[in-house]
Image (cartoon, helix red, strand yellow):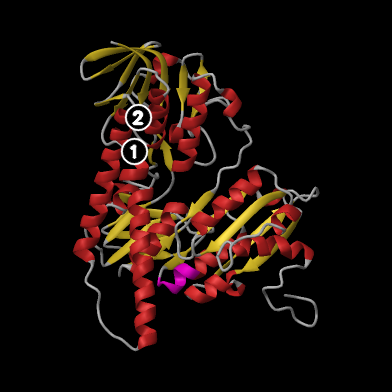
Amino acid sequence: MKYDIVVIGGGTAGYVAGSILARKGKKVLVIEKEKFGGVCVNFGCVPSIFLFDVTFLLNRFKEIAYYLGLDGEIEYKDLLFSKRNEIINYLSNAGRRLIEDSGGETELGEAEIISRSEVKVNKRIVEFDKLIIATGSKPLIPNIDGIEDAISEDDAVNLNSIPSSMVVIGGGYAGVEIAQIYSRLGSQVTLLSRSEILPTFPEDIRSVVKDSLEFDGVNVVENTRIVKLRDGKVITEKGEIEGNVIVYATGRRPQLPKGIEKLGLEINECGIIVDKYKQIRDNVYAIGDVIDKERKTAHSAMFDALVASLHILKETTFIPPDNFKIPVVLYTDPQVGVIGDHKEAKKFSVFPFAATTRAIINGIKDGYVKIGINERNEIVFGEVIGDKAEDLINILTLVVNNRMRIESLALMPFVHPSLSEAIVNAAKGFFDLDVDRYKSKDGKT
């Protein structure tokens, strides 16, 4: 059978591309090796954010109980894991249904590329005019003696019990999130990083997150080299650390489909090399974590799928410029959201949530909004640390990608009271108009 487009991989990138192209009248087949939804739904953002939400609420309950003078335990553990699995299964099935609802076809099985116009799946040959590779990524196993006794970051968010102790190897996104989640769930957690944690983030973010981790009981050990794993212990330059469960969260590597060598693609250790339209050659595209790019996130994968699909459909006028900025969010408490490159900014303004009426009402006042502008007064950087950062950074993503001028944002009427007012007040700060916070006699706020 011949299809207009065959998509290998039914994860975030694959289901979006398959659904768009099928809705536009293309004959589409999406092939998934294991579970629709890919890393995000099954092993990444969905289970980890669910656990984050639970621990966030647990901490708020504990704070309320403390202020009310209450004492007691919350029974949640059995429900915790069953509810997580229920959400994963629902969203995995939803991804497949969305493709089929759009008019596309789906098939479970491992695809093998056998030529530049054919793939093999479940013992049948499928022809295509165009191929989209969306096979995602998998955890990078570090070269450490004894690492076979550890579990990956994907396994960690799918544990069905809470270990008494845990050692997390890796101070990146996944490592810090996992460390805080399990510490809040009751594990004694040590986080090991070969450098400072979150090395790609600005110093102010690293400092806030580290303080938060340590406040939650995580033993953060930075700038250390791991020698080996032995008998449930991690041997480092700075001593031995024991963990009932040892997790490695040391990055990810592209998961390439079988037979990819038949396409003659340019591939490095970070993934497949593509152009700005996610195209490799006339009839082959690659999207999502499998490609070589800086930001490997679910929303980045969706963006790739949109760009590739529009290019296939010859609707390129809708495609944003290739320097479009992708936001990143760190699901710690406090949450962190970043858009743009802080090195592009020449001047910054910061507004704290503690001076925002809505934050004062809900009692979650930690954090701030930071905005950076260039020499032309264009907003080129945004940073949010605090409650609802995942939503507020989306506003700044619109602002940064449209190169909005700071005076336009400063004059924008946002709802009062709302957390998003901190964004406008940060903009007003460039003009000494941020009157919602006190100003000292020396002129400092």
Residue marked by disc 1 = 38
**Residue drawn at the location 46% of the way across and 18% of the way down:** 284
Residue marked by disc 2 = 9
- The answer to whether 364 appears left or right of 320 in the picture is left
Q: Which residues are magenta?
A: 212-217
Front residue (pair 355, 35): 355
**Residue drawn at the location 44% of the way across and 59% of the way down:** 176
Q: Secondary structure at mark 1?
A: helix
Front residue (pair 341, 432): 432
Identify whether 196 is placed above or below 257.
Answer: below
Evaluate if marks 2 and 1 touch, with contact meaning CB atoms under 8 Å apart: yes
Earlier-in-chain disc, 2 versus 1: 2
Q: Position of residue 135 (x, y in %)?
A: 37, 30
Q: Can you tell which quarter of the image residue 254 is in?
A: top left
- Which quarter of the figure is the C terminus placed in? bottom right
Identify whether 180 is placed above or below 124.
Answer: below
Front residue (pair 245, 345): 345
